Image (cartoon, rainbow, N blue to C red):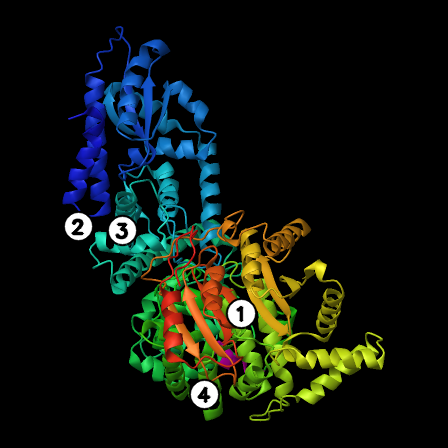
Amino acid sequence: MPLQLDITYSFQRLLDKSKNVGGRLISRQLTHIVDSFILSKFETSGVGFKSGDEICLIAMGGYGRMEMSPHSDIDLLYLHNGIKEERLSAVISKINTYLYDSGKEVGHSCRTIKECFQYLDDMSSYHAFLDARFLTGSRALFEKFKTDFLEKLPEKRTKNYNEAKEEILSARFLKEDRPILLSEPNLKTDLCGLRDIQYMFWMEKSVRNLPSLGGLSILPVFQRGEIQLLQEAYDFLLRTRIAMHVITSRKTDRLDLNLQQEVAEYLGFGNKSELSSVEKFMHALYRHQKNIYFIIRTYLDSIIEKRKSSEGESFPYEDLHFFKIGDTVFPPVIGTLFTNPHTIYRDIMLSFRMIQEKNLQVSGTLLNEFRFASNFLDDDFKYSSEVNEEFLKILRTPSERGRVLKLMHESGVLGAILPEFGACTNFPLFSYHHEFTVDEHTLLILHELDLLDKGEFQDAEVQKAYQECSKIELLALAILLHDAGKVKEGDHSEYGAELASSVGDRLGLSEEDTELCRFLVEKHTLMSELSSKRDIGDPKLIFDFSRIVGSRERLRKLYILTVIDTKSVGSGVLTNWKSAILNTLYQNTIPYLVSDSESALGEAPGRDVQLDNLKTYLMTKEGLREDISKSVVQFADEVIPASYLNTISNRRILKNFKSIGILSQDSSKGMIFETEQDPAFVTIDVVTANQSEILLDLSCAVSSEGLSLLGMKSYTLGEFWITSVQVIDSAGGGNLSPEKLDRVESKLRSIASGNLKRESIAFARTDWNPRKQTPESIINRSVMFYNGDLPDVTIMEVRMPDVVGLVYRMLQIILHLDLKVRYLRVSTSADYAYDSFYLQTANGTKLEDQDLLLKLRDKILNLQLSEQMLEEISI
């Protein structure tokens, strides 16, 4: 067998036989395989040394800890007693070359014991020395290395590095508004990953010389069994990382969504085609990570308590007793907390009210006391009037609501009060734009509620709406329940609304308050869906929405919930554009709700009133003569479709009127191209004559410049086309350079003149930011038609994995079927495109021919979504 296959073949044989073996054992076996080959190469190197020469090979870092994964690096120290470099090079070359030829990344150093002291100024090198393990060569030299180097590491440097590690861990674990669980965790470097455990171990190993992770059990801070939980978590992380190496055939620590299905199957959680397999796998991973979190928090707080115990004081609250250091509260020195079974319900709830009222930080040791006590909270707990009364007090107190609820959740108490929310614990969401589990996402929303309480929310419009709200406890309760329905198949909003009704009854809420909470849960996606899929300038849509909402108070709460829910999905999801359109929908709806009372709805203004308002604007704001103003009004009244008057501002109506006038007088201009910078996007207005495919041209020019379409509106007046689009860059920003917009215009004109073929630029990448490949099991294609919303328009909603040129490709199909696109709303999430087309037949009617609808649906669903798509569709 060729040499370069030795390690790889041995690894493969081992991995094929050990799919159900623990991670640490497999790592040690993989390490042993590498050890045996290195030993063999060293013994057969044939290099002669002089009498008195000593050399030994030492495994360092992860290899030294015996934590090999299939594609891990191999770190070696060639330790010698002063042998000349040229005599060492032969053995080093033979071993390293063999490892390189076997596909291994090798990091090596060649030093004497004295020289090792020169390489302690880097913390990673210091840690590598702590994990040093003898491989082969002179055992006497290695023993000397232990006594003369490892046992004489400078105390000051050890102290400084341990303080640095403590600071790193404290910043990660003691920041209470930081999410613990991620949907795509890095198993090595993210919170509760391998590195966090190693930091804690290194801190203790440097002062106690612990032989292994299990040695941490000698520390008095840990309760019986906790280090076993830590070892099990460490084992699971190592096993998962090994699976990732095997599946990807490379070194990787990031558990991406597109890996989770295969990893789940590899680890024996079930068939990868079944979503339940991934759910079980991720739930197990999150459970282990939660254990890591609590154990390291307890460890950190024990350091603080030991160091600052002299600064602490006894801290009574009513008839309970605690210990306080600064603003952090610890259990009492004598362990009497939560020991009385007759008062445990009251004592637990009273403790959380104390934390909220006094704005205290909670130590890991106290959090563990809550966790232990939560095991004694049975079904009676959630039905206790005393418990529910205290819970509602926490929800009603306008301070630290979110933080206290997070602490209650982490300790298992919140799940005992609200098992409907507790069912969401560690529940994964398989979506690239959802960065967190259901419970972590919900807790982030509650953190935004705390910012609103403090008046520190970054969006002034949302903050203003919040200040006008009453009964915020109902909003807080709705936040807790809004995604609770995701644990069940089907419409999570409907199921969540059912849960809200039962919870309201259990908490003793009034019928009115229960109904409001139920409404918020049931409709929490409505504003987001309308603003991203519908024309929010349509008065009928606004009127229908206002009838659903019913009152300004409901509207305010729904608006706030929608914004903070979207913001808490993940970084960058709440773009300026989304904030702007949500606020527009909110502001446009307010006039229809004439008071805070139920069913007090205003009527949509009539068309005559709108035309009169336009005329008044033109004469008073623009200073136009009455005859010219009448001409503009007549123009606006004749543009098709009639929604033009509702969706285009008075100022832009005048601009469109002037543009058509210019083209009428000088057709050689071809088109009028104008741009306007809005806070969250750029609006491009294009007026053309006899250019029926302007939508295709615009979508090509825009996507070829790496821009994303947000919305597209199209209107006609005789031979003239008025097209307005909103665009952002690929990162969601609206600050576009003039040069880029000039290139869009240039390409449009070149296409119109025939000098540029659309297909040559429709699928070009330029600086477009490609998204990850989306597993088909996560993102399903769908095409839905709605014929009941508008009298003369069919709305087609399309959900597809997003690729370059997708809108162009769909427009090709639509226009080839001789259909009109009156309005287009583009909503691109991190993993899919959700586009809404307002369609009409060539005669200006809705699409009612079922054969036509089926044909349109099939052609869009059967689009080949490669990133090239360079050939025309066969219609």
Q: Amino acid at mark 2?
A: Asn
Quarter of the image with the N terminus is top left
**Disc 3 vs disc 2: which is toward the camera?**
2
The reply to whether residue 46 is visible in this rendering is yes
Q: CA distance from mark 1 to mark 3?
A: 48 Å
Where residue 738 sits in the image (x, y, percent)?
68, 52
Q: Which residue is mark 2?
A: 20
Q: Of label 3 and label 4, which has the lower sequence position?
A: 3
- Badge 2 crowding class, 10 Å Cα cut-off, few under 14, some 14 to 19, many 20 or more, is few
How crowded is the residue under tag 1: few (<14 C-alpha within 10 Å), some, or many (20+)?
many
Which SS class for mark 1? Answer: strand
User: Residue 212 — which label?
Assistant: none
Residue for badge 3: 236
| Sooner in the amino-acid sequence: mark 3 or mark 2 | 2
Q: Tell me the CA gap for discs 3 and 4.
A: 43 Å
Residue labelled with disc 4: 514
Image location of residue 241, percent across then percent down: 30, 46
Q: Which three-letter amino acid code belongs to the residue tagged 1?
A: Leu
- What is the tally of numbered marks visible in this picture? 4
Q: CA distance from mark 1 to mark 2?
A: 52 Å
Mark 1 and mark 4 lie on one chain; the one further toward the N terminus is: 4
Residue at 39% over, 27% down: 152
Q: CA distance from mark 4 to mark 2?
A: 49 Å
Do the numbered discs 1 and 4 sit on residues whose CB atoms are within 8 Å? no
Task: Give the residue pinned by disc 1.
Answer: 824
Residue 811 higher or lower than 415, as above or below: above
> Does the magenta portion include 445?
no
Q: Is residue 472 magenta?
A: yes
Give the residues drawn in magenta, as a range: 470-477
**As displayed, is residue 122 above or below residue 821?**
above
Q: Which of marks 2 and 4 precedes in the sequence? A: 2
